[in-house]
Image (cartoon, rainbow, N blue to C red):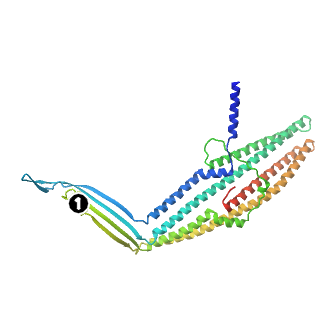
Amino acid sequence: MKKVLLLIGGMLLAVSAVSAQKRWTLQQCIDYAMENNITLQKQKLTKESATEDLKGAKAALLPTLSASTNQSVGYQPWKDSGMSYVTNGTVNTKVDKTSYNGSYSLSGQWTVWDGNKKLNTIKLDRLAEESAELQTQETANSIQERIAQIYAQILYLDENVKVNEQMLETSKKNEERGKEMVDVGKMSKADLAQLSAQRANDEYAIVEAKSQLMNYKLQLKQLLEITDEERFDVVIPEISEDHILASIPEMQKVYEQALLNRPEIERSQLAIKSSGMNVKIAKAGWLPSVNLTGGVTTSTNSLSSTGWGSQMKSNMTSSLGVGVTVPIYDGRSTKTAVNKAKIKQLQAQLDLQDQQKTLYSDIQEFWLNAWTNQEKYQAAKSSVESAQQSYDLLSEQFRLGLKNIVELMTGKDNLLSAQQSQLQSKYLALYNQQMLQFYQDGVIK
């Protein structure tokens, strides 16, 4: 009795574990990926690096200050004179062949004017920081789009498996009916073999559909950076016909809104500003620069009769200077830098135009696919109803011996083809509608 109770308890725990398996919604997948995707995390680090560059550029406006010291030992092996002193009426001479020297300095420098090169560098680094942030958003958008695409494919394949399972049940019934007809002499064994082959094909189609479904779930799991052995599954939402045939936003409105909020467009615009800033930085090579320098130095020597503190004081010197550098001829390096910066500015403008063209093309493709698949869905819906009615009639006529095996299998193939066409158009319509919405307001639902 105890063993039976333990067995029942184990079975209940197993059932509980399966029921507790997490099923991911689309939003949960997106939220998790935004926190854990490695590619996105790397991009965030790039943004942090750009922020450090900006801080460094701002600090470059401040004066620099440095302190240094040098300690050395000197040795004069043939020195024969030194300090004399009297002890108890006797004159003694001390010759110090070893000496200890120390020097100390504090120096500073400040660039008063450099043709606004440092100020423009700050502006350039600020644009680079913004660009890195936009690149992060771009990567996040790309990941979200990929998740939505895989998720839609999973929904399609999940429903496709169910359709194939229904077809298998139909094939099994036809096979059983065929066996009965062979037993009473109304069908040949060759025709029965065709029904058995059809049943086997349907079983293979289910295995193939399930394999594809598992593959896409694996792709989604990898995209979320989930590496444990826990089983992974997604929530299958209820999708009504109202969702499939929802109103499609106007293509031009989607494009106009996308121009305002898509990070790749804004990043291209920043690239134009950055190239303009590079032109200004390059032109600073033609302008004079003014530097302010200052310092304090002192030194000590062990051979001096003066104390260390007094030497530090008496040997101290200070200086303050202004340096002006005027470029006269630099081997055309500045002119070359300016011209190359202008060329990159023109390239940035062309890149923006190309990005806008690509954006319009993508939106146009999503819009056309959404509209086309809505039309296909409605046509496929009628086709499925017609094919189902035709197949039901063929099945009844086959049961009565009025239709042959070829006509029955053709009717079944037509029904399956119509159902799969309906499924494809259904989920393609949903996916492309969602992409239009994403391009318009940046939200995947």
| Residue positioned 81% across, 52% down in the render | 418
Q: Residue furthest top?
A: 1
Q: Which residue is mark 1?
A: 310
Quadrant in which residue 350 is drawn: bottom right
| Residue positioned 76% across, 48% down in the render | 159
Apparent side of residue 359 relative to residue 98 in the rendered image (left or right): right
Apparent side of residue 307 relative to residue 140 in the rendered image (left or right): left
Amino acid type at image mark 1:
Ser
Q: Nearer the viewer, residue 304 or 137?
A: 304
Residue 269 x, y percent position in the rendering: 59, 67
Residue 385 x, y percent position in the rendering: 85, 52
| Residue positioned 38% across, 70% down in the render | 291
Residue 423 x, y percent position in the rendering: 77, 52
Apparent side of residue 116 relative to residue 166 in the rendered image (left or right): left
* Element at label 1: helix
| Residue positioned 23% across, 60% down in the render | 311
